[in-house]
Amino acid sequence: MDHCDVLIIGTGAVGSAAMYYLAERGVNVVGLDRFPVAHDKGSSHGQTRIIRLAYFEHPNYVPLLRRSYELWKDLEEKSGNQLYSETGIIQIGPTDGEIVTGVKASAQEHNLEIENLTASDVTSRYPGFMVPEGMEAVFEKRAGFLKVEQSIKAYINLALNYGAELHTGVSVDNWKRTSGNGIEVTTSRGAFSADNLIITAGAWAKDLLRPLNLNLTVARKPLFWFESDRTYDIEAGCPAFFYETPQGSFYGFPSIDELGLKVAEHTSGDPVLDPLKVDRSLHKTDKAKIDGFIASHLNKMHYPRMTDHKICMYTRSEDEHFIVDSLPGSPQVNFVAGLSGHGFKMASVLGEIMADLAINKSTNHPIDFLSAKRFTQ
């Protein structure tokens, strides 16, 4: 039976980062994944993900985001790849809505620079976007997007260079604690043992964390790309965007290649009962909703031609905040789960946190508000 210091189940965004930060510290780490590196069967694919500091979801995330920015920059330097593009982000919604109110609260608490824009400001500076009556806009310059697949590949490649092992095409059947306070994992390729276990399995986390009885739900999330006017090109200064509307919350990215503008809905999503059997076909109702958003809010997109379509998954916690913790009574078992569709931007710091917990059984990062205990107390 193969033995290592730390075994990681799931080497997507967070798992790949944890592999690197452990291997860099000289830890004997092994990663297991059912799929190839940077695959398109989970939650971390589809070209790009937004990263922003003035976090409307909760001000407590801001310290984690600050560290994330530092770590992404370090990854760029060590891998030699450009992974982050600072385009800024325009966020538009009701004055008393979740997004605008949340952005302002985080900015005030953490002294972050944001800019309030009137509808005429938006029309002048970003002519591709409309601000409906009763809504307002806020702009954050220090925001942009990360390249998803390239970031994961960079973490994996660096981890392997530091001596980490990766086994793909491996499905995990079960894991258990051994009498010597170690861990044994049963897989399709036999058993692995380790002193510590990290579970970063995304949509598959619920089954692996069965002792916690977490109420995690998985949603099917379509991503769309459309042929777009040059107004939406990154070279034209088009920012990333996030809208809160009565029909749902929608987000998107400037055109960076021949696929054009990327648009998706953050809210809603059909339930997924089995992540291995998620429906990846194009649903007319999904596209109709995106078409409706585009027609009402992106005024330079006239009957755009769809160029690509992907399906990813959100694994949502009950309150849609992350769950980052150790298994009660088992500090050798640490996990990240329920990222709820907004975790990729913090994958870097979450990987560092997993490395801290595996090695030191503690971390200096402020993660108490993400503890699983909030669901059991």
Image (cartoon, helix red, strand yellow):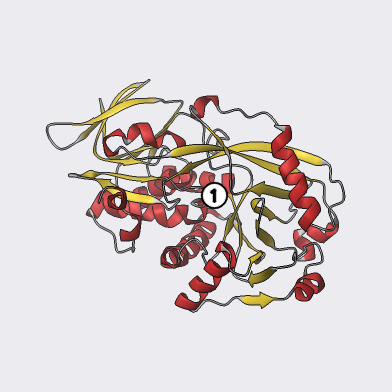
Q: Which residue is mark 1?
A: 151
Residue drawn at 86 percent across, 46 percent down:
303
Q: What number of labels is visible?
A: 1
- x and y percent of residue 149 in the render? 58, 44
Q: Is residue 246 above or below residue 329?
A: below
Rendered image quadrant of residue 362: bottom left
Q: Is residue 290 above or below residue 166?
A: below
On the rendered image, what quadrant is the N terminus found in?
top left
Mark 1, secondary structure of its residue: helix
Residue drawn at 52 percent across, 76 percent down:
112
Q: Is residue 198 above or below residue 300?
A: above
Residue drawn at 30 percent across, 64 percent down:
364
Residue nearer the viewer, 244 or 153: 244
Given the image, on which type of amino acid does mark 1 rest?
Ser
Residue nearer the viewer, 233 or 161: 233
Residue at the limit of the structure toward the right, as seen here = 302
Residue drawn at 76 percent across, 71 percent down:
122
Is residue 174 visible to the viewer in this orientation of the structure? Answer: yes
